[in-house]
């Protein structure tokens, strides 16, 4: 369990199949991104993924140039 999540609060997820935010008991893990601490963070999951990918793509420590 991630820091910040209590035993009864397993966070929020973004479902790639339905393009919706859902609680822990939603769709199967293979089609979800998360967990996120808040519903709002889960709603912004695709933006978060895009931003992180950009950061990693431009990280000089991992660059092959």
Image (cartoon, helix red, strand yellow):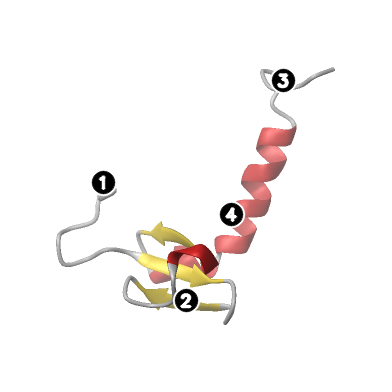
Looking at the rendered structure, the secondary structure element under dot 4 is helix
Is 10 drawn above or below residue 27 in the view shown?
above
| Residue of label 1 | 3
What is the CA distance from the residue labelled 3 to the residue labelled 2? Answer: 34 Å
* Local SS, label 2: strand
Residue density around tag 4, few if under 14, some if 14–19, many if 20 or more, within 10 Å: few
Choose top left, top right, bottom left or bottom right for residue 55: top right
Query: Residue at the location (38% across, 77% down)?
Result: 26
Label 2 belongs to which residue?
Answer: 21
4 or 2: tag closer to the N-terminus: 2
Q: Nearer the viewer, residue 5 or 16?
A: 16
Tell me where residue 44 sits by quadrant: bottom right
Q: How far apart are the alpha carbons under marks 1 and 4? A: 19 Å
Residue 35 horizontal side relative to residue 19, left or right: left
Nearer the observer, 65 or 29: 29
**Could you tell me residue 34's position as x and y percent?**
44, 59
Relative to residue 64, is residue 61 drawn left or right? left
The disc label shown at residue 48, or none: 4
Query: Disc 3 versus disc 1: distance between alpha carbons?
Result: 29 Å
Residue at the spot 50% in from the left edge and 69% down from the top edge:
14
Please report whichever mark, 1 or 2, sits nearer to the chain's N-terminal start.
1
The residue carrying pointer 1 sits among few (fewer than 14), some (14 to 19) or many (20 or more) residues within 10 Å by Cα, namely few
Element assignment for label 1: loop
Q: Which residue is mark 3?
A: 60
Task: Choose the circle earlier in sequence order: 3 or 1.
Answer: 1
In the image, residue 18 lies at what x, y percent? Answer: 57, 82
In the rendering, which numbered label is found on residue 16? none
């Amino acid at each position: 369990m991630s820091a910040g999540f209590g035993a009864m609060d397993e966070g929020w997820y973004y479902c790639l199949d339905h393009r919706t935010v859902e609680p822990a008991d939603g769709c199967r893990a293979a089609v979800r991104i998360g967990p996120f601490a808040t519903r709002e963070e889960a709603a912004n999951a695709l933006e978060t993924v895009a931003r992180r990918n950009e950061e990693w793509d431009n990280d000089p420590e991992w660059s092959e140039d």
